[in-house]
Image: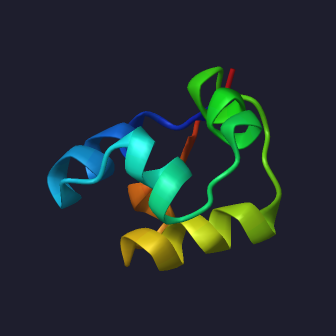
Amino acid sequence: MISYAPLWETLKTKGITQYQLIHEYNFSTGTLDALRKNRSITLNTLHDICKILDCEIADVVIFTKD
């Protein structure tokens, strides 16, 4: 199972809001919706998130067995 729970903690730690992601970093609202619903995203998107937040992949997503 894919969970983006670490992302929300990382955003909080970095002091970045979802609003900022959309308006300052031109982040797609559709992508944010996918993240909120733990849907899959592309590796390119994951890379972009890590660049924006200056973090590692583990700070954004966790994979667990179902």
Asked if residue 6 lies left or right of residue 31, the reply is left
Q: Quadrant of the N terminus?
A: top right
- Across and down, in percent, residue 46 comes to 66, 63
Location of residue 50 in the rendering, given as x and y in whole percent from the top left corner? 50, 71
Q: Position of residue 5 (x, y in %)?
A: 42, 33
Which is nearer the eye, 19 or 7?
19
**Residue 1 seen in the figure:** no
Task: Using the image, determine if residue 52 lies above or below residue 11.
Answer: below
Q: Residue at x 39, y 58 (%)?
A: 59
Q: Nearer the viewer, residue 27 or 64?
A: 27
Visible in this render: residue 36? yes
**Rendering colour mode:** rainbow
Q: Would you say 34 lies left or right of 19 here?
A: right
In the foreground, 26 or 39: 26
Q: Is residue 55 left or right of residue 16?
A: right
Above or below, comparing residue 22 to residue 38 in the picture: below
Q: Nearer the viewer, residue 27 or 54?
A: 27
Up-down relation of residue 62 to residue 44 (above or below)? above
Q: At 27% from the left edge and 42% from the top edge, which residue is drawn? A: 9
Q: How many marks?
A: 0
> In terms of image quadrants, where is residue 31?
top right
Which quarter of the rendered picture does the C terminus lie within? Answer: top right
Q: Residue at x 16, y 53 (%)?
A: 13
